[in-house]
Amino acid sequence: MSAADRMAALLTTQTRQRVDFGALAGAADAGDSSLANSPRRRRILADAARTLATRGLATLPKGKDGWDHSAHPPLPRWVRRPPATRPPGRQPTPRAYVEQLAFATTMYLSTADHALLGPINALLRDEPDAEVVPLADRSYQLYGDEKRLKNIERHHLVTKGFLNLTTHLRARPTPAPLAMFELGPAPWLLIVENTAAFTSLREILGTWPDRSQVGWLAFGEGDHLIASLPTALTSFRERHHPVNTMLLYADLDLDGLRCAQKASERARAAGLPPLQPALGLYQALLNQTPRVHPPATTDDAHTAAAWLPPELAEPVTELLTTGLVLRHEALALPQLRTLLNPASPLLHQIRGGATSQF
């Protein structure tokens, strides 16, 4: 076995892409007791390195720093194994689908797509009128895993309109409920994104002198708020306490405003009243001291602030692009208590004169 062969054998056992040439030289020495003391050793090792490169088993360094020039011929300090080749993808075996999934027979689908559709196909074939159940229940039934369909609404077949939860999966999402507190009988709901502000407002509204002015207070943030908004309808129905006004108080930063926009869209899709910004709280928040934050681009700031009416959108856009944000904590409990005056109508103070157009 040649020095190149012994080096090649060692390369097959390595897991790292880059292999020290000293280890390869050691493998050559171990297979030939005379090589270590041979005056031609350096030449033999250099020839072996070139042979590895010629065979496509290793890539030699390109830069001068990758070579040892202390003697002639120069030797590489390391070699790089070629990246592992991926086996060619296999086209899934064609299969028969029920009429509702006929799209699967005319478009290219991955093995994972077919693995998803197989149990759904069996459900539609055997129980085409199956009761619509919680998504986690259906996931467990079809795949033996209650979380298998957790993010199915983001799957490309769903987002492109090919797969429908109700029609094909006979299932419905069951998000965690929105945390809601019925503080009074008034027909409005205020959603607060931050726990500190929520706790402060709950304390203030819980002791409001005129209880007829107080409605619902809810806590929700980020993806949880967006997913859980439709559950508010159940709370309204169970308590026989519907609302005609829904307001949101989120942080004045990109994340908070983007969440507000998505939540507003979700509320509209669920048949809830329009989700309006709590302008009275926002106007007061804008008068507080902002904190430094990496600046947003003009486009990002303008798009995020579009949820607010023009008189707030403009200063908020300027705030975000100059590298500042305003979080709820800037409008602390004492300021909130001063802002909300029991001598004035509560909803008007929270809305700040907002109308249903927002």
Image (cartoon, rainbow, N blue to C red):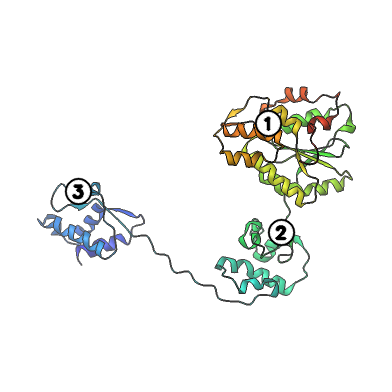
Secondary-structure class at tag 3: strand
Is 194 situated left or right of 29 in this image? right
Q: In this view, does 146 lie to the left or right of 12?
A: right
**Residue drawn at the location 73% of the way across and 25% of the way down:** 333
Q: Which of 38 and 342 is in front in this view?
A: 342
Residue corresponding to mark 2: 135
From this view, report whether residue 323 is shown above or below residue 172. above
Which quadrant is home to the N terminus? bottom left
Viewer-side residue, 14 vs 204: 204
Q: State whether residue 252 is above or below residue 121.
A: above
Q: How far apart are marks 3 and 1 (CA)?
A: 62 Å
Quadrant for the C terminus, please.
top right
Q: In terms of secondary structure, where does tag 2 sit?
A: helix
Dividing the picture into quadrants, the one containing residue 54 is bottom left
- Going from N to C along the chain, the mark reached first, 1 or 2, is 2
Regarding mark 1 in the picture, which secondary structure is present there?
A: helix
Q: Which amino acid does label 1 sit on?
A: His
Where residue 153 appears, x then y in whole percent?
66, 57
Instruction: Check disc 2 and give the amino acid type.
Output: Leu
Residue 68 - label: 3
How far apart are the alpha carbons under marks 3 and 2?
Answer: 63 Å
Q: Examine the rendering and report whether any part of residue 251 can be seen.
A: no
Mark toward the start of the polypeptide (3 vs 2): 3
Query: Mark 2, residues whose alpha carbon is within 10 Å: few (<14), some, or many (≥20)?
Result: many
Residue 82 placement: quadrant: bottom left
At horizontal 52% and vertical 72% (from top left) the residue drawn is 91
For the point 84% across and 36% down, the residue is 215
Badge 1 is on which residue?
328
Residue type of the residue flagged with mark 3: Asp
* Circle 1 residues within 10 Å: few <14, some 14–19, many ≥20: many
